[in-house]
């Protein structure tokens, strides 16, 4: 991944402020993550959202009473963060920076760090390990690290063409997980990365689950049907056998 390419992608090609709001499928990703935060983050946690985008999670958590510092690599996103903060709630701080190197913060400064983006852009194992390591430096003992990742095989299932004309491209992606500015992992690979740092995994969940493969159906459901779909998803999102079908997954882990 070229850092400049990534910044251009989010500044021009993929406005981050729309991503979790565009349709029922993307909304369920946000709803699942916030349910897990509500369950696992102690009240009033001082936390860092180091890949905050335009602040969907940062402002939600601040509204819930947590003390949130938020930052992002993309300048446009940071500008939107600052504008959104004027509407409230207030954050402890906003910065533009790289989640892999945050020397402005002291060791153990936070009770939790959200690393929700870096692992699906950093193209090397060394880069992903550096992002996790820097996050852990900032977390006090007993604190929580929340990491999201893109699941390689769900991406493949969504991208295979009906006649398999693109099968060679798909197989190449299955082998190395790289595609443009994105890196797609697997549940096993990401869990092992976190365990290699001595973290205790307390939650591993599918953020969108089977929803991506039911996009057309989910987006035409009645309100009652959508509520029933969400109930099913929330009841099954932590079933290990379903993790591989979800485009986006999350792991919450405790620093021992």
Image (cartoon, helix red, strand yellow):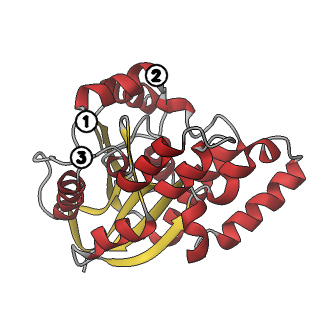
Numbered circles on residues, count: 3
What residue is shown at x 17% (from left), y 55% (from top)? 126
Which quarter of the rendered picture does the C terminus lie within?
bottom left
Q: Which element is circle 2 on?
A: helix
Position of the N terminus, as image quadrant, is top left
Badge number at residue 253 = none
| Quarter where residue 162 is shown | top right
Where does the image place residue 36, in percent across and percent down from the top left?
A: 53, 66
Residue 193 rendering spot, x and y as whole percentages? 28, 68
Q: Does residue 69 appear left or right of residue 30 in this picture?
A: left
> Which residue is tagged 2?
13
Name the residue carrying label 3.
Answer: 99
- Of the residues tagged 3 and 2, which is closer to the observer? 2
Task: Give x and y (percent) for residue 100.
Answer: 19, 48
Q: Secondary structure at mark 1?
A: strand
Q: Which residue is mark 1?
A: 95
Q: Residues within 10 Å of mark 3 (few under 14, many from 20)?
A: many
Report crowding for label 2: few under 14, some 14 to 19, many 20 or more residues within 10 A (C-alpha).
few
> Which of the pair 46/158 is nearer the observer?
158
CA–CA distance between discs 3 and 2?
22 Å
Callout 1 touching callout 3 (CB < 8 Å): no
- Going 85% across and 41% down the picture, which residue do you hit? 220
- Please report the residue visible at 43 percent of the width from the left and 63 percent of the height from the top: 186
Q: Is residue 236 left or right of residue 146?
A: right
Between disc 1 and disc 3, the foreground one is 3
Alpha-carbon span between mark 1 and mark 2: 22 Å
Q: As drawn, is 165 to the left or to the right of 71? A: right
Residue drawn at x 44%, y 67% as measured from the top left: 187
Mark 1 / mark 2, whichever is N-terminal: 2
Label 3's element? loop
Q: Is residue 221 above or below residue 227?
A: above
* Residue 131 appears anywhere in the view: yes
């Amino acid at each position: 991944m070229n850092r400049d390419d990534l910044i251009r992608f989010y500044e021009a090609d993929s406005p981050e402020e729309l991503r979790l709001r565009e349709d029922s499928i993307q909304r369920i990703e946000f709803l699942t993550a916030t349910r897990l935060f509500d369950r696992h983050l102690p009240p009033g946690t001082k936390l860092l959202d180091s890949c905050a985008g335009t602040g969907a999670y940062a402002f939600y958590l601040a509204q819930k009473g947590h003390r949130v510092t938020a930052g992002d690599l993309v300048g446009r996103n940071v500008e939107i963060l600052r504008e959104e903060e004027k509407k409230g709630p207030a954050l402890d701080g906003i910065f533009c920076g790289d989640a892999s190197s945050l020397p402005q913060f002291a060791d153990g400064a936070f009770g939790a760090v959200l690393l929700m983006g870096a692992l699906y852009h950093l193209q090397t194992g060394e880069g992903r390990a550096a992002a996790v390591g820097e996050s852990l430096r900032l977390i006090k003992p007993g604190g929580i690290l929340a990491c999201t990742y893109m699941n390689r095989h769900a991406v493949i299932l969504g991208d295979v063409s009906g006649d398999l004309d693109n099968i060679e491209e798909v197989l190449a992606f299955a082998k190395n997980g790289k595609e443009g500015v994105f890196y797609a992992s697997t549940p096993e690979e990401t869990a092992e990365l976190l365990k290699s740092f001595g973290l205790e995994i307390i939650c591993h969940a599918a953020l969108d689950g089977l929803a991506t493969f039911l996009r057309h159906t989910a987006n035409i459901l009645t309100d009652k049907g959508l509520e029933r779909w969400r109930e099913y998803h929330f009841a099954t999102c932590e079933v290990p056998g379903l993790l591989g079908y979800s485009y986006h997954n999350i792991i919450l882990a405790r620093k021992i």
